[in-house]
Image (tube, rainbow, N blue to C red):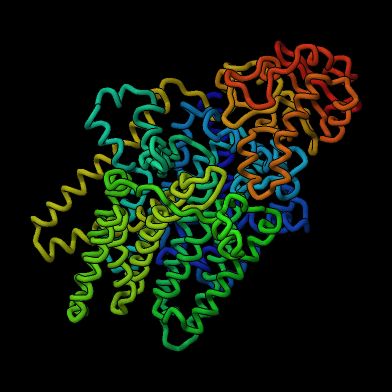
C-alpha cells in the first residue's frame, strides 16, 4: 500500500466518522451545557457512540437487523431531529459563530493527530503477536454481523461472550466506507488516539475555566492534558536508561524501551514464585497498538469525566429554587447511558463512570443524601441498566472461582461464598515502594501539591481539629509501616486530605469535583493492593491492568489543571524560589517520563525504516504468501453464515510470525475452535461451554485425520462447515505443539480429495475444499 493510497483510504474513513459524529452534535451541545465549550473537543467520541447506539441497542434486542441501512437511517433520523430542534432553539449557531476559533483548533488538532498517527503506524502496521489476532477476529466478526451479539469466530455456533460493543462502533465506519477490517484496525487506533488526546485537552481546558484560572493558565492546562495522557510514560524507562543507557537503547522494543515499561509491579505470591502484573498506560498502548477494550473505551471514559464536570459546573444545579434537577437530568441520563454502554465496551469502566457522575451531582452543592440527588442517582442507574440491558441478557461474566475451591466454612454461607468466588484478597506481600513510585510518582507529586494548595485555603477552619488530624495521619503512617503497606502511605495519605477537602463546603463546585476525581483515583489504587477480581488467572494481573489505566486517565486530566494552579500558589505563598524549585523538580521528572513515547515509537517502527501502508495483514504476503492468497479468496467469495474448518490453535500460537487460527481471524468465518485459553477465559462462567473446548479440538482432529469416516461427515454437518482449509498449519503444526492441535495425519489430509468436496482454491501449500453445492458469488 503506497502513501497516496493510505492517505486516500484514511480520508474516506475520517469523513465517515466525522459525518456520523456531527450528525448528533446538537445533542452533545445540549447535554453538556454546563461546560464552557459545550462539548467541542468531545464531538467524535460521543458523536460516533450516539450515532451507532440506537441501531446496536435495537439489534441486540432482536428488534431490527444490524444492517448499514438501519444504522444510517436511524442516525439520519436522530440527526435531523436534533438539528431541527436546536435550530429552532436558536442557540447552537450563535454559539458556533462565537466560538469558531475554538472549533477550528479542535478540528485541526483532531485531523493532524489522526493523520499523523496513520503515517507513523504505516511503518509497522502488522496485526501480529500479543492479542491483536483476537482483536481483529472480533472486529471482523462485527464487520460482517447482521445480528447482535456477533458470532464468535473461534467457537462456531455460539455468539461472542466478551466486551464487543467497542468493535461494533468501529466496524460501522469500516462498513460504510467499504474498508477491510485489517485496514480499519489501524484506522480505529488512529481515531482513538486523536479523539482521546483532544478530549484530554478539552476536559482540562473546561476544568481550568470552571476553576477560575486566567486565560493563559487555562490554555496551559489544555496543553498539559495531552502531554500527561500520551506524552509521558512512567519513570521505569528513565531509570533503566540511567542504570544501563547503552544496553537499554540497543535492546529490541520487547526487551528495551518498550514492553518492559508495562511490567513494573511484580508480585511474589509464594516463595520462589513471581507474577508480572500489567501496568499499561496510554503511550504504551498506542505504540503497541492492541485494539483492546480498555483502549476502545478510553475516549468515552475521558468523556465521562466531562459529563461529571458539566453536572458540577451547572449553575442551575447549584440553585436554591429546588428546580435544578430539571437541568441536570439530561446530563444524568447521558452519563447513565454511557455507563451502560461502557459495560458492553469494557465492563471495568462502568463503575467509575457512574461514580464520576455522582461526584458531579454532589459537588454541585446539594447534600449527598438529598431527595433530589437520590432521584437523580436512581435515574442514573436506570439509564445504565436500560442501555446495558441487551448486553446483560446475553453476556455471562467471565469471573468466578469454582465453588469447590472455597473452604467448607465459606461455602456454607451463600452470600459470603458468592463474594469469595468473585473477589480475591491479596494475601502476599504488598507492592514495593520503589515500584509504586516508578509507576505513579510523577502524578502523586503533582496531585499532592494540589491538595496542599487547596488545604491551605481552608486549613483555618480545622484549627480546632488539628490534633485529630495529626492523630489520624500518625495512625495511617504507623499502620503502613507496621503492615509493610507502602501504598497506604502513597495513596492513603492523599486520600485522607482529599476526603476532608471534599466535605468542605467553602470550596467551589469545580474544586470539589477535582478533589473528588483524585479521591476516586486513590481509592482505585488502594483497591488493587487489597483485592482483585477472580478470573481465569486467579491473581490481580488484570485488576491492576484495568484500574491502573483508568487512574492514569484521571490523573492526566487532574495534573494538567493542578500543575499551573499549584505553582502559582507556591509563588504567591512562598515566593519565586519555591515555585522555581518545585517547578524544576517536576520538570526533570516530566522530561524523564517524556523519554518513553518517542523512543518507544522509534524502536517499534525499527527507526522508521520502511513505510508499509496500514493493511494489518499485508505482512502475510511475505511470511505466508499461500495463506495470504487463500484468505483473500475466501474474503472475496464467502457469504454471511458460512463457516470454515482450520487447525485448532492455542492462545498466542504462531508459526514464522503468522498467528494461529489466521483464517477465521482474517475472514470472520467462524471455525470450530480457536485460541483455547481465550475461549476458556471468555466462558469462565459457562462450565458446559468450557467443557466443549477440548471436545471441539478432538473433533477437529477427527475430521482432518479421517475425513471420509461417518463420524467426520456427521461432525461437518453438526458444525455447519462450508469450507475445509488445508495449509502449513494443518500439515506442519506449530513450533510448540498446541493441545489436540496439528500436525494432522498426512494420510487423513490426503483422503480429503475422496470426501466429495470440490477444490475451489489451490496455491502452493494451501488447498480449500467447499461443501458440494456451494457456489461462489
Q: How far across and how far down the image is residue 755, in percent?
A: 88, 19
Please report the residue visible at 61 percent of the width from the left and 21 percent of the height from the top.
737
Q: State whether residue 447 is above or below residue 291.
A: below
Q: Is residue 171 left or right of residue 124?
A: right
> Between 219 and 193, which is closer to the camera in this rendering?
193
Q: State whether residue 295 is above or below residue 420.
A: above
Which image quarter: residue 620? top right
Q: State whether residue 95 is above or below residue 123.
A: below
Count of numbered labels shown in the rendering: 0
The reply to whether residue 447 is in sight is no
Q: How far across and how far down the image is residue 600, in percent?
A: 37, 32
Q: Quick one: which residue is furthest to the bottom in this view?
A: 321
The reply to whether residue 580 is in sight is yes
> Between 724 and 686, which is closer to the camera in this rendering?
686
Q: State whether residue 379 is above or below residue 127.
A: below
Quadrant that contains the C terminus: top right
> Between 157 and 457, which is closer to the camera in this rendering?
157
Please report the residue visible at 33 percent of the width from the left and 70 percent of the height from the top.
499
Please report the residue visible at 48 percent of the width from the left and 35 percent of the height from the top.
118
Which image quarter: residue 712? top right
Amino acid at each position: 500500500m503506497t502513501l497516496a493510497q493510505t492517505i486516500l483510504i484514511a480520508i474516506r474513513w475520517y469523513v465517515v466518522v466525522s459525518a456520523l459524529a456531527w450528525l448528533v452534535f446538537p445533542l452533545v451541545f445540549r447535554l453538556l451545557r454546563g461546560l464552557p465549550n459545550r462539548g467541542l473537543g468531545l464531538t467524535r467520541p460521543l458523536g460516533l457512540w450516539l450515532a451507532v447506539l440506537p441501531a446496536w441497542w435495537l439489534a441486540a434486542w432482536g428488534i431490527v437487523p444490524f444492517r448499514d441501512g438501519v444504522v444510517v437511517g436511524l442516525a439520519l433520523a436522530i440527526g435531523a431531529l436534533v438539528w431541527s430542534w436546536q435550530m429552532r432553539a436558536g442557540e447552537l449557531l450563535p454559539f458556533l459563530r462565537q466560538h469558531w476559533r475554538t472549533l477550528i483548533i479542535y478540528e485541526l488538532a483532531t485531523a493532524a493527530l489522526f493523520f499523523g498517527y496513520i503515517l507513523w503506524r504505516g511503518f509497522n502496521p502488522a496485526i501480529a503477536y500479543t492479542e491483536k489476532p483476537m482483536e481483529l477476529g472480533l472486529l471482523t466478526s462485527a464487520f460482517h454481523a447482521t445480528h447482535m451479539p456477533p458470532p464468535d469466530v473461534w467457537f462456531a455456533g455460539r455468539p461472542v461472550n466478551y466486551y464487543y460493543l467497542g468493535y461494533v462502533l468501529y466496524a460501522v465506519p469500516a462498513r460504510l466506507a467499504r474498508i477491510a477490517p485489517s485496514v480499519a484496525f489501524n484506522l480505529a487506533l488512529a481515531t482513538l488516539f486523536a479523539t482521546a488526546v483532544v478530549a484530554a485537552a478539552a476536559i482540562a481546558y473546561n476544568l481550568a475555566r470552571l476553576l477560575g484560572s486566567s486565560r493563559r493558565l487555562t490554555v496551559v492546562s489544555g496543553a498539559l492534558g495531552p502531554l500527561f495522557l500520551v506524552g509521558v510514560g512512567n519513570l521505569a524507562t528513565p531509570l533503566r536508561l540511567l542504570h544501563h543507557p547503552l544496553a537499554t537503547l540497543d535492546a529490541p522494543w520487547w526487551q528495551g524501551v518498550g514492553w518492559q515499561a508495562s511490567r513494573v509491579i511484580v508480585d511474589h505470591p509464594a516463595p520462589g514464585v513471581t507474577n508480572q502484573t500489567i501496568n499499561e498506560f496510554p503511550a504504551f498502548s498506542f505504540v503497541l497498538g492492541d485494539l483492546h477494550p480498555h483502549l476502545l473505551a478510553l475516549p468515552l471514559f475521558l468523556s465521562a469525566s466531562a459529563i461529571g464536570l458539566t453536572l458540577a459546573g451547572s449553575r442551575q444545579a447549584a440553585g436554591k429554587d429546588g428546580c435544578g434537577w430539571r437541568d441536570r437530568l439530561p446530563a444524568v441520563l447521558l452519563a447513565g447511558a454511557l455507563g451502560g454502554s461502557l459495560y458492553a465496551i469494557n465492563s471495568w469502566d462502568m463503575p467509575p463512570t457512574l461514580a464520576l457522575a455522582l461526584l458531579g451531582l454532589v459537588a454541585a452543592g446539594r447534600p449527598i443524601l438529598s431527595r433530589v440527588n437520590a432521584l437523580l442517582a436512581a435515574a442514573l442507574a436506570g439509564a445504565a441498566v436500560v442501555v446495558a440491558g441487551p448486553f446483560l441478557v446475553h453476556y455471562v461474566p467471565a469471573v468466578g472461582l469454582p465453588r469447590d475451591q472455597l473452604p467448607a466454612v465459606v461455602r456454607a454461607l451463600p452470600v459470603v461464598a458468592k463474594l469469595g468466588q468473585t473477589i480475591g484478597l491479596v494475601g502476599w506481600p504488598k507492592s514495593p515502594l520503589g515500584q509504586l513510585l516508578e509507576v505513579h510518582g510523577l502524578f502523586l507529586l503533582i496531585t499532592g501539591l494540589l491538595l496542599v494548595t487547596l488545604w491551605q485555603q481552608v486549613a483555618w477552619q480545622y484549627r480546632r481539629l488539628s490534633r485529630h488530624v495529626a492523630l489520624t495521619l500518625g495512625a495511617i503512617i504507623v499502620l503502613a509501616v507496621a503492615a509493610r503497606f507502602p501504598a497506604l502511605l502513597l495513596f492513603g495519605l492523599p486520600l485522607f486530605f482529599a476526603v476532608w477537602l471534599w466535605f468542605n463546603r467553602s470550596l467551589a463546585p469545580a474544586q470539589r469535583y477535582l478533589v473528588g476525581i483524585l479521591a476516586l483515583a486513590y481509592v482505585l489504587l488502594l483497591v488493587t493492593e487489597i483485592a482483585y477480581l477472580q478470573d481465569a488467572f486467579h491473581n490481580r494481573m488484570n485488576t491492576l491492568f484495568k484500574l491502573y489505566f483508568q487512574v492514569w486517565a484521571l490523573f492526566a486530566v487532574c495534573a494538567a489543571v493542578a500543575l499551573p494552579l499549584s505553582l502559582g500558589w507556591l509563588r504567591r505563598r512562598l515566593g519565586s524560589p519555591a515555585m522555581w524549585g518545585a517547578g524544576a523538580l517536576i520538570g526533570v521528572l516530566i522530561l524523564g517520563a517524556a523519554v518513553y513515547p518517542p523512543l518507544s515509537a522509534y524502536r517499534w517502527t525499527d527507526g522508521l525504516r520502511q513505510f508499509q501502508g496500514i493493511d494489518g495483514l499485508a505482512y502475510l504476503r511475505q511470511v505466508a504468501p499461500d495463506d495470504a492468497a487463500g484468505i483473500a479468496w475466501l474474503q472475496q467469495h464467502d457469504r454471511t453464515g458460512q463457516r470454515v474448518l482450520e487447525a485448532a490453535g492455542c492462545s498466542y500460537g504462531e508459526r514464522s510470525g503468522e498467528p494461529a487460527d489466521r483464517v477465521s481471524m482474517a475472514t470472520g468465518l467462524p471455525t470450530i475452535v480457536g485460541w483455547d485459553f481465550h475461549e476458556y477465559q471468555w466462558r469462565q462462567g459457562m462450565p458446559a461451554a468450557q467443557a466443549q473446548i477440548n471436545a471441539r479440538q478432538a473433533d477437529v482432529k477427527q475430521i482432518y485425520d479421517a475425513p471420509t469416516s461417518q463420524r467426520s461427515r456427521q461432525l461437518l454437518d453438526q458444525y455447519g462447515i462450508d469450507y475445509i482449509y488445508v495449509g502449513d498449519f494443518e500439515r506442519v503444526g506449530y513450533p510448540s505443539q498446541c493441545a489436540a492441535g496439528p500436525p494432522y495425519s498426512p494420510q487423513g489430509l490426503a483422503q480429503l480429495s475422496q470426501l466429495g468436496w470440490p477444490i475451489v482454491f489451490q496455491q502452493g501449500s494451501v488447498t480449500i475444499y467447499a461443501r458440494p453445492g456451494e457456489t461462489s458469488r
